[in-house]
């Protein structure tokens, strides 16, 4: 296999997609919905910015009281323009997935139906170069789609005098990369079925069935399996009937120098502490099982990672990504498996 011939096939597929009315129509709908979501995100950003400015004014008023020993005033974080990109997640999970499927479900079946595949392979090009080129062409087209959508949204922000910081630019690029991985995941599913069946209509139907099962049924199955593996949840301790918890009076000094008291039940406190530890272990075990099954769902993986990237947190972004490692792995493993299946099937396809 040579890269030059694969790129030639990729360029042909790229050109075919951007001259396809079906692909352009879905892309236009995707762009429109993304822009509408951007408008909703702007409203959320403006509201958060107003709240932040109000908090700044309130902080000035409380500063004098803080010097007199009043309780500290907790300032909210400055709103990020990543709020604008958060609504794009829903558009990508719906129309984005359909766009990716439209790009790949007939890449091979179209050649079979027109009997041009045999003619194509009669030229000095190998089968692996054809399938790799088709995959590269489709992935490049989807990359252009994601890039154009992000470029349009960013341009609107700049027109509105909203300039992202360096950290926000990194988050936007990472959000685009995650979105592209999600689209490639469903593109490879469509490509795999395109190599397995003979008709484009069947490839489309099978891919949509997989989309429904993975997006709707798999999360329910994952939660059920996680519950079965983790077992019954621990039960909270019960206070024996007729028994009154021991009461200990303790003194607290408030700003007003008032005296307060609360109830302390030492044996029950130990039981509650043990229950919380057991509950945390149970929840973690169930989460691990669910995360493993989530690897099979690009929707769940993309949702987890995109929500983290588009919602600014307190810590560094790269450290925060460690909490969604299963989602990142899923967005890599899922398309890899289906592309491998498409590759092996195409290499063994009878073109007669």
Image (cartoon, grey):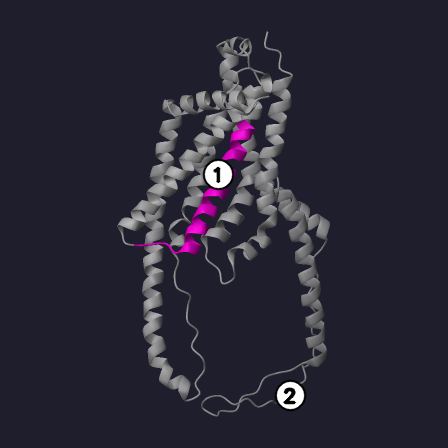
Query: Residue 115's x, y, as percent?
Result: 51, 8
Residue 9, placed above or below residue 231: above
Q: Which mark is residue 248?
A: 2
Q: Residues within 10 Å of mark 1 (few under 14, many from 20)?
A: many
**Relative to residue 49, is residue 116 depicted above or below?**
above
- Tally the marks: 2
For the residues bearing labels 2 and 1, Cβ distance under 8 angstroms: no
Which residues make up the magenta segment? 162-190
Q: Is residue 218 left or right of residue 91?
A: right
* Residue ranking furthest to the top: 352
Judge by depth and name the residue closer to the eye, 213 or 338.
338
Q: Quadrant where the C terminus lies? A: top right
Q: Is residue 108 magenta?
A: no
167 or 110, nearer to the observer: 167
What is the magenta segment's predominant secondary structure?
helix
- Determine which of the numbered discs, if any, sits on residue 180 in the image: 1
Residue at the image point whose x is 32% and y is 68% from the top: 53
Q: Callout 2: 10 Å neighbours few (<14), some, many (20+)?
A: few
SS at mark 2? loop
**Between 265 and 242, the one nearer to me in the picture:** 265
């Amino acid at each position: 296999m040579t890269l030059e011939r694969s790129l030639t096939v990729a360029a042909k597929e790229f050109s075919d997609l951007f001259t396809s009315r079906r692909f352009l129509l879905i892309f236009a709908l995707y762009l429109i919905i993304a822009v509408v979501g951007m408008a909703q995100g702007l409203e959320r950003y403006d509201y958060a910015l107003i709240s932040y400015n109000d908090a700044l004014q309130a902080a000035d008023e409380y500063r004098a009281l803080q010097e007199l020993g009043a309780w500290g005033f907790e300032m909210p974080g400055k709103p990020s323009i990543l709020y604008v990109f958060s609504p794009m997640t829903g558009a990508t999970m719906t129309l984005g997935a359909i766009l990716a499927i439209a790009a790949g479900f007939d890449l091979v079946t179209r050649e079979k139906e027109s009997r041009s595949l045999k003619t194509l392979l009669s030229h000095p090009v190998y089968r692996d170069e054809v399938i790799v080129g088709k995959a590269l062409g489709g992935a490049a087209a989807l990359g252009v789609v994601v890039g154009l959508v992000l470029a349009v949204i960013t341009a609107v922000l700049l027109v509105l005098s909203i300039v992202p910081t360096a950290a926000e630019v990194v988050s936007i690029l990472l959000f685009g990369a995650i979105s592209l991985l999600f689209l490639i995941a469903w593109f490879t599913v469509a490509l795999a079925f395109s190599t397995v069946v003979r008709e484009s209509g069947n490839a489309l139907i099978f891919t949509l069935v997989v989309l429904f099962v993975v997006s709707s049924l798999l999360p329910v199955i994952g939660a059920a399996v996680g519950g079965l593996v983790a077992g019954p949840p621990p039960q909270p301790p019960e206070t024996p009937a007729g028994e009154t918890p021991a009461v200990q009076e303790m003194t607290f000094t408030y700003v007003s120098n008032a005296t307060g008291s609360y109830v302390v039940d030492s044996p029950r406190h130990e039981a509650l502490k043990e229950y919380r530890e057991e509950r945390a272990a149970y929840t973690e075990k169930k989460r691990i099982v669910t995360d493993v099954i989530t690897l099979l769902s690009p929707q769940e993986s993309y949702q987890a990672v995109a929500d983290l990237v588009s919602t600014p947190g307190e810590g560094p972004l790269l450290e925060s990504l460690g909490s969604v490692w299963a989602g990142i792995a899923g967005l890599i493993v899922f398309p890899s498996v289906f592309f491998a299946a498409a590759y092996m099937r195409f290499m063994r396809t009878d073109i007669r």
